[in-house]
Image (cartoon, rainbow, N blue to C red):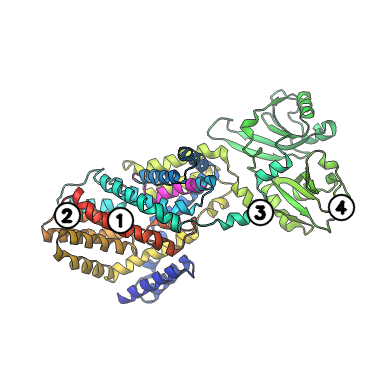
Amino acid sequence: MYTTLVILLVTAILFAVGRVRSDIIALCALICLLLTGNLTTAEALSGFSNPVVIMMAGLFIVGGAVLQTGLAKMIGGRIMGLAGNSEMKLFLLVMVVTSVIGAFVSNTGTVALMLPIVVSMAAGSRISSSRLLMPLAFASSMGGMLTLIGTPPNLVVQEALIESGYEPLKFFSFFPVGVVAILVGIIVLVPLSKMFLVKSDKASDNGRKAGKSLAQLVSEYGLADNLCVYKVGLQSKAKGMTIGQLNVFGSYGVSVIEVRRVTGGQRGLIKNVEQKLASADTVLAATDVVFVSGDKEKARLFAADYGLEQANAGEYRCESGLDFYDLGIAEILLMPDFKFFGRMVKDCGFREKYGVNIIGLRRKGENMTEGVGDMVIKSGDVLLVQGVWDNISRLTSEDEQWVVLGQPLEEAAKVTLDYKAPVAAIIMTLMVVLMVFDFIPVAPVTAVLIAAVLMILAGCFRSVEAAYKTINWESIVLIAAMMPMSVALTKTGASTLVSQSLVSSFGNYGPYALLAGIYFATSVLTMFISNTATAVLMAPIAMSSAASLGTSPYPMLIAVAVGASMCFASPFSTPPNALVMQAGRYTFMDYVRVGLPLQVIMGIVMVVVLPLIFPF
């Protein structure tokens, strides 16, 4: 027993110091419990098969899809519309919306759904996401106190009451407690988050220094200024012809920079968009959308000669002027030993060798896009290339005669597949419905796995690899490795000894003292073992303690539920705390600075308020 307590103490100290990654500390603690014989191999590895851990991994994928499809940005835009330019209003909206969702959906699911939305809102309002993410996690736990199904400890104390022959709690019996928790959380978190949770986004600063964004490139080269969009009709002369046969540049002096093929209906929910690089052998089919760059009068003449229909540009162009689902653009800086200096752009063979087209050229600060093919390349030129994202990325390692400016694959990851947003919304709604309604015989972890797989199969990610990259493995390993700690504490009797000694110390001083002892004993234990396990352990102790004093068990058991759920001082005490740790770039001490005062103040308020709602 004492060995387990020592390992726990050392682990907590290492977390607080923050010199070593949290997942490595958790794994080392797990290994120590194994080597000391406090856990069997099966018990030590049980966390990696725990439904909560599997659900967290699935929720990372679902959240990634919500972000990748632009659904997060759409929802965030609606919320930001209500907040206006007020950071305080945005903070309050995040707290309230998250709490309401948390009343009906698991707090882990609530955070996973809201996290990409909040990150998108923070970026849109140009405030640090760390200012909102920890309050987001805490609000999900507070919202769980609004209803009977909001958090597992509520159901645990409900079961304890029923087994002892008491009248069960109603669905909204916890509602007044939840309202008090949310109000206390908002009042305490407003100043604490401003003091401790504002971090600079160094990663984004580095990204801006490394290269220009897609929107900047489109703007600087004026790609959208001379862009015309046409559709190949059923009777069009261009149907069945290749770009080479059309001889667009030779005959009209304009360039076809993209051919887009949309399947599944323009306005249908299930829609797929395929972008093709315009090459000489690209065959045009009916309903294809052709993007033509150059003099607009010449482009209209080309369209008239081949019977192309004017397309609604609003359907095919994003905020920056172009979409970059499959095709991207990037600048390459030519080195002094570039072998094609003095030759025309069209003779360089970039299309044949590397699968990219040169669509722009920057020389002495001047950006040019018209007639680029006939320009002679000179020393110091920067070329704007267009192609499939992977081909652009390969330019980095294909040759040493140029340098690709920026990180193409990182830019590709920022491009939202917005035409998939309706599909992502349907899948997310399905997942929430399966998790909310108990009469549907589907476990929450199953609902999440179904949603994660559907997001991948529906094309809400560029690839399966992109979906896996959304999983934050540090958080997964942290939770999975720390879960067996609760098994060790229970198995060795350490948790029972601590809880009983704390409660017995306060029992002789009346019901308020006993209530405080139960609440804070539960609160402390939850920092080291799961809130559900803590509630299971403390519920019978609270019931017997209330019986010995001759008081009502309701306030004592509600104290167990609230104390188990309101744990904010540790990143691994609840899955929501762990979910936001990496996204918010938090350290262990950030949770102590912000979460510990909130946890203590919440406990003091609850000790006073609970007997008013549930009399002794």
Mark 1 or 4, nearer chain start: 4
> Going 29% across and 48% down the picture, which residue do you hit?
180
Whether residue 104 appears in magenta in the rendering, the answer is yes
Give the spatial CA distance, label 3 vs label 4.
Answer: 25 Å
Q: Are marks 3 and 4 in contact (CB under 8 Å)?
A: no
The rendered magenta stretch, by its main secondary structure, is classed as helix
Q: Nearer the viewer, residue 149 or 244?
A: 149
Residue beneath label 1, please? 602
Q: Alpha-carbon neighbours of circle 4 within 10 Å: few (<14), some, or many (≥20)?
A: some
Whether residue 198 appears in magenta in the rendering, the answer is no
Mark 1 or 2, nearer chain start: 2
- Say which element carries label 1: helix
Q: Are marks 2 and 3 in contact (CB under 8 Å)?
A: no
Mark 4 or 2, nearer chain start: 4
Residue beneath label 3, please? 407
Name the disc covering residue 341, or none.
4
| Residues shaded magenta | 103-119
Rendered location of residue 385, percent (x, y): 74, 46
Mark 3 or 4, nearer chain start: 4
Rendered location of residue 148, percent (x, y): 27, 46
Query: Is 145 rendered above or below residue 509?
Result: above
Residue beneath label 2, please? 553
